[in-house]
Image (cartoon, rainbow, N blue to C red):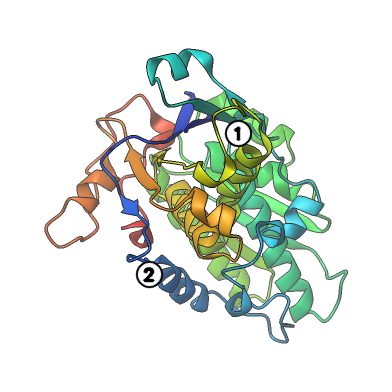
Amino acid sequence: FFILTMSLPTTITIAFLVLAGLILPSVHSLSNNSKPNFQDIVSKMRADLPQPKQASPSVSLSNIDYASPPSCVAQEARSLNLFSTTPLIHSAPLSRLCHPHPVFLKLDLLQPSGSFKDRGMAHLCTTVKKMHNSASNSDTADRMKVISSSGGNAGLAVTTVARNIPQMDVSVIVPETTKPLVVEKLRSLGAEVTIHGKNWNAADALARQWVDDAKRSGGGAVYVSPYDNPLLWTGHSTVIDEIITQLLEQSFDQATTQTNNMKIGAVLASVGGGGLLCGILEGVERNYHGSNEIRSNLVRGTKVVACETEGAASFAASFNSDNGSIVCLDGINSIATSLGATSVTPAVI
């Protein structure tokens, strides 16, 4: 199967493709004899996250069950309708181009903010709010604030999510290059917007400084990275859970296709900072290692392919470096500015 996941960023349309039955350059391939250690990387990063003073097992990040049924992943965020289950539709034109491999489109542009990032932001915000309440020994703790540094999809997503969580405020710090239309949209959604610096790095530095200042003064503020947080990745991983469920539910060509021989050949993902790619890897692994044999079989052998634009290929630069070290680009020379991260999260490498 081909599955194309459509998302609508600030300036361009992103497409994530899931292709089946094709031989493609792979970032990550699963088989019976090759089980990856991405879980170990995620667990280590989760261990570095702040824990609540008196956290119960239900909110401790170290107690997340990696092999949980997909319905348990980001369950609270989903129950609050902070992100949507988006349609998976068959594409006749792309299927003709890729015959005999059927192609499906995953329409994540229908998320409330217009991109897949609602998934990760919803899981992150509900988790940190629950931890904040637990540390305060109250289900109705005083207000807390999330602070982000993105004037693109991430800023729109965290603002869209936070406005629907009681007692949560959001500040977004954007660089001077951010379009006025985006600034006005963020403010109309309820964000406190500050324009600072000539690029994202300067805006991000101020966001981190504000969070540090708030912590020193005893305030409840949490830094929200656009892409570099395990909670974001887990939220993003729900797109794989949905794709598998929807493929199993759809009855295309029942005369020739049986559930036990269905396979997702590969997942193609657009890459900026690597958050979506981390989520896709996590979602594939969770279903592969899970107890549901049908779901596991569907992603056995699935390849993951990272797709970047020329002029913003920070992932390729790091992935192809001699020692796997993180390469920071001098700048972004692509019109696809929403995919423009000068470096990726080390975890994705």
Please indicate, yes or no, whether residue 293 appears anywhere in the rendered image: yes
Q: Is residue 106 left or right of residue 140?
A: left
For the residue labelled by badge 1, is the local secondary structure a helix, a strand or a loop?
A: helix
Q: Residue furthest bottom?
A: 54
In what element is the residue under mark 2? Answer: loop
Question: Which image quadrant: the C terminus?
Answer: bottom left
Q: Earlier in the sequence, mark 2 or mark 1?
A: 2
Mark linked to residue 177: none
Out of 1 and 184, give the one closest to the viewer.
1
Residue kind at label 2, given as amino acid type: Asn
Q: Quadrant of residue 269?
A: top left
Q: Which residue is mark 2?
A: 37
Residue at (51%, 41%) from the top-left corner?
A: 262
- Where residue 272 appears, as percent x and y from the top left, is 39, 42
Residue positioned 53% across, 61% down in the render: 286
Amino acid, disc 1? Asp
| Total numbered badges shown on the rendered structure | 2
Q: CA distance from mark 2 to mark 1?
A: 28 Å
Give the residue furthest to the left. Answer: 322
Residue 178 image position (x, y, % from top left): 49, 32
According to the image, label 1 marks what residue?
A: 108
Mark 2 or 1: the one toward you: 2
Q: Are marks 2 and 1 in contact (CB under 8 Å)?
A: no
Measured from the top left, where is residue 293 in percent x and y? 57, 59
